[in-house]
Image (cartoon, coloured by chain):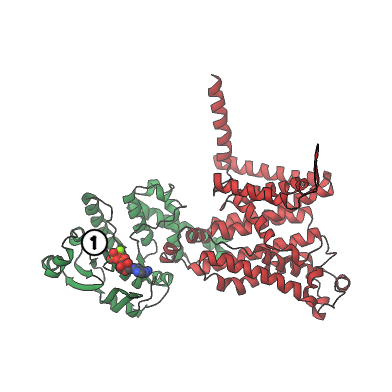
Chain colours: A green, B red
Amino acid sequence: MISTRDVSMRFGGLTAVSDLNIEIQKNEIVGLIGPNGAGKTTAFNAITGVYRPTEGRVVFKGRDITGQKPHAITKLGIARTFQNIRLWTDMDVLENVLVACHLRMDVGVFASTLHLPGYRVKERRSREFAMSLLESVGLADQAREAATSLPYGKQRRLEIVRALATEPSLLLLDEPAAGMNPQESLELMDFIGSIRDRYDLTILLIEHHMQVVMGVCTRMYVLDYGVTIAHGTPDEIRRDPKVIEAYLGVD
Amino acid sequence: MKIKRNTLLTLAGLALLVGAIAAADATLGRFSVRILNLSAIYIVLALSLNLLNGFTGLFSLGHAGFMAVGAYVSALLTMSPAQKDMNFFLEPIMPFLRDIQLPFPLALLAAGACAGLVAVVIGVPALRLRDDYLAIATLGFAEIIRVLITNAQSLTNGAQGLKAITKYSTTWVVWSVAALSVVFMLALVRSSYGRTMKAVRDDEVAAEAMGVNVFKVKSTSFVISSFMAGVGGALLGHMITTIDPKMFTLTLTFNILLIVVLGGNGSITGSVIGAIVVTVLMEALRFLDMPMNFLFIKTNGLPGLRMVIFSILLMIVVLYRQRGLMGNKEFDWDGFIGIFRRKGASSAGGRS
Ligand SMILES: Nc1ncnc2c1ncn2[C@@H]1O[C@H](COP(=O)(O)OP(=O)(O)O)[C@@H](O)[C@H]1O
Ligand SMILES: [Mg+2]
């Protein structure tokens, strides 16, 4: 599905990610873990085109996507959420999802503005799709409320729903459980499992508390100072001395 | 039921507005009609700047430049060869331009199209710059356009400007264009494309990540806005019937910005109200620039005092009502009637 081949990302003298080699198969849920500052978010940014990797290639569905613009990569089927929630603040919940639907509507500025018949059909379909997505996370009742008025946990869910509205095949989640209590985190992981099944997704999940993702991931990669120090099943990771050392004093 | 009521109210409101404009046009003196029509042109201009500033989050200071392009294109296209010969006495006009003469509606479209074209050429590279640089770059471009106009003697008649432009901007023309602009803006910002503009404004990074081609959306917004500015400039030229490069300085852009900020960044209603209020006040306060006589103290007239008052007004708005008159809200009947209901209820409560 996706692989990164020796991807490195340097900022001036700092190597945030070095020689990252991730390989994910269809419908897997894979974790990317590591202490704060390990380079996890940078790895996401290199995959999604926010940064152009200093070195290496990113290959998605057999296609080299290195250096493409983020919106083009989203169009190819990779969607993401952000570590620090980035909803559009002056829009309501439904509008936040509708903007993400625009990508697949394929309408230009004229068809949109003139509300041509073709556009109207697509707009209605987008609204139905957006509402069904909101329904699936229990946000349908709040569709008309300001996105930022939602409680934190719901904002996180809305961000996931918004990413789903771009109809991705690969979903990248950056610390979706941040700021949640253990109970909420557990529910979220169940939710992530369920959307994988419902929307036929492949998921790469960042988390810095590794316990949270142990249950939902089939495999995980561990980064420390940009270097991949381990990868394997949750059980293997748990017992890996390098991982234990990296996490000493962190968890 | 409620929707039907609101539609009826809107129709009634429109009829009232058309009636009011007709009455004003028929009864008011030339000076007052001119202010009325100037408001309509400022509505078009404010909406066009609001599209950039309020709906797409692009801070551009180049509006006067695009207006100048529109004003010159339309004036040159509508003038007869004889009119042009009269204007170009220092240096004759380019022969091919001399003989072109188009009907006003076509010239108006050409004015918008040329301003849009200039926007593509100069704006598109500038849009790759970060926000604050965009303002400086567009300001510079507007100034370059002005210098070009001043120096292209055989094309624009240079510093002498163009005089005796036919007065096509009648009350009905300017208010029709203003109404069309309002409808266009409402249709645009409420469409799917309009939503992507707001997304770019609120968070560019998130917009790009959700598949919005941010650069394309910005460029589209910039070109549409420039088109409207060009049309506004053309209308202005055909209203005051003379144009010259000195009209199109930063002060003009500043006036439009003032309207947008006062009315509310991101509110179409705000721009409409702001345009009317500012234009009328601007004329009503004209006496401030004149010599004044306070009982014992005589002043010699302070040209520019008016602008000082307006700048202070802008600062007060920015300090106390940061989002302008309307914020980013729009007028709707439910809200409007709600205000009266609430007032009525509270005053009734006070009495009992
Ligand atoms: N745009 C940038 N410019 C310079 N340094 C950066 C940039 N983005 C990230 N870094 C640095 O890269 C390192 C990894 O950051 P990040 O990927 O955010 O870590 P994580 O997500 O694992 O917590 C940090 O030291 C951070 O300061
Ligand atoms: Mg991070």
Nearer-the-camera pick, B111 or A224? A224
Q: Nearer the viewer, residue A192 or A90?
A: A90
- Observer able to see residue A240: no
Considering only vertical position in the picture, is A60 above or below B302?
Answer: below
Residue type marked 1: His
Q: Where is residue A117? Give x, y as percent.
A: 55, 61
Image quadrant in which the C terminus of chain A is located: bottom left
Q: Is residue A74 above or below residue A192?
A: below
Dot 1 beta carbon under 8 Å from ligand 1: yes
- Give x and y (percent) for residue B96: 80, 80
Q: Which residue does the image show at 24% across and 53% down from the upper left? A: A185
Side of B144 relative to A101 (left or right): right
Q: Quadrant of the N terminus of chain A?
A: bottom left
Residue B240: x, y in percent?
Answer: 80, 58
Query: Quadrant of residue B228 in the image?
Result: bottom right
Q: Nearer the viewer, residue B331 or B232?
A: B232
As helix, strand or loop, the secondary structure at mark 1 comes to loop
What residue would you read off at disc 1? A208
